[in-house]
Image: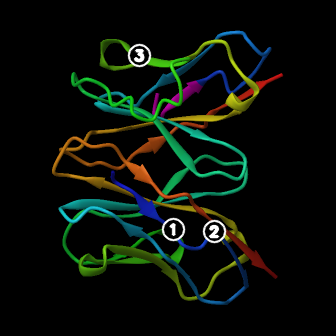
Amino acid sequence: GAGVSQSPSNKVTEKGKDVELRCDPISGHTALYWYRQSLGQGLEFLIYFQGNSAPDKSGLPSDRFSAERTGGSVSTLTIQRTQQEDSAVYLCASSLGSTGNTEAFFGQGTRLTVV
Amino acid sequence: AQSVSQHNHHVILSEAASLELGCNYSYGGTVNLFWYVQYPGQHLQLLLKYFSGDPLVKGIKGFEAEFIKSKFSFNLRKPSVQWSDTAEYFCAFLNTGTASKLTFGTGTRLQVTL
């Protein structure tokens, strides 16, 4: 596709359940980011993938959060045993990477509601 | 740790007023700088960017930003705001010396009144 695609666009889940959020970056983009945006909050960095390097996981808020990027393309963010405070919009972005044009392009986000 | 400070959290202006939103970043080396905008109900989109060259950068919709290296600043300006500029504005930077992540500020909510 032409842009960053995220699915699902909305997800309602029960507290304690696991969820998977998907991100399809722009083809050829080596860098991929996950951010979280809560109501009234800024953009909270979660995790960053750059090519074949080890991901920067420094923003993951707890060990319930994990992410992987398969084949250098699609990424999945997994939240285990969801809690109400996990409710937020999860944003994915991709870019050509730090050695090229570093402009990041964002997807529409996945709105997660934990009830 | 790398960080970005946006000092104005919520700004209210009347149409035609001038705008300046502050942004300071924490790294002293070579950086790429960005302003992103999020209109109500829409996704984040790039407003303007600075990689190198002329420190005065012009973006879409009449916005501009000036990179002042000595002040570690990249303030966003617009001479005359419109009601349609109501949005949230995010400053971001990336340290080009390492394969570092794009770091965002906490955002500034701009409300333009008629």
Report the span colored magenta: A1-6
Point out the frontmost of discs 2 and 3. 2
For image coordinates 39% across by 57% down, the residue present is: B3
Dividing the picture into quadrants, the one containing residue A19 is top right
For image coordinates 80% across by 14% down, the residue present is: A14
Label 2: which residue? Answer: B9
For image coordinates 69% across by 18% down, the residue present is: A82
**Image position of B62 with respect to A12: above or below:** below
What secondary structure is found at the residue carrying circle 1?
loop
Mark 2 to mark 3 CA distance (whole Å): 33 Å
For image coordinates 51% across by 68% down, the residue present is: B6
Mark 2 is on which residue type? His
Mark 1 is on which residue type? Gln
Quarter in which the C terminus of chain B is drawn:
bottom right
What secondary structure is found at the residue carrying circle 2?
loop
Front in this rendered view, residue A5 or A39: A39
> How many other residues sit within 10 Å of disc 1, few (<14), some (14-19) or many (≥20)?
many
What secondary structure is found at the residue carrying circle 3?
strand
Residue A5 belongs to the span the image colors magenta: yes
Counting from the top left corner in percent of width and height, residue B33 is at: 34, 62
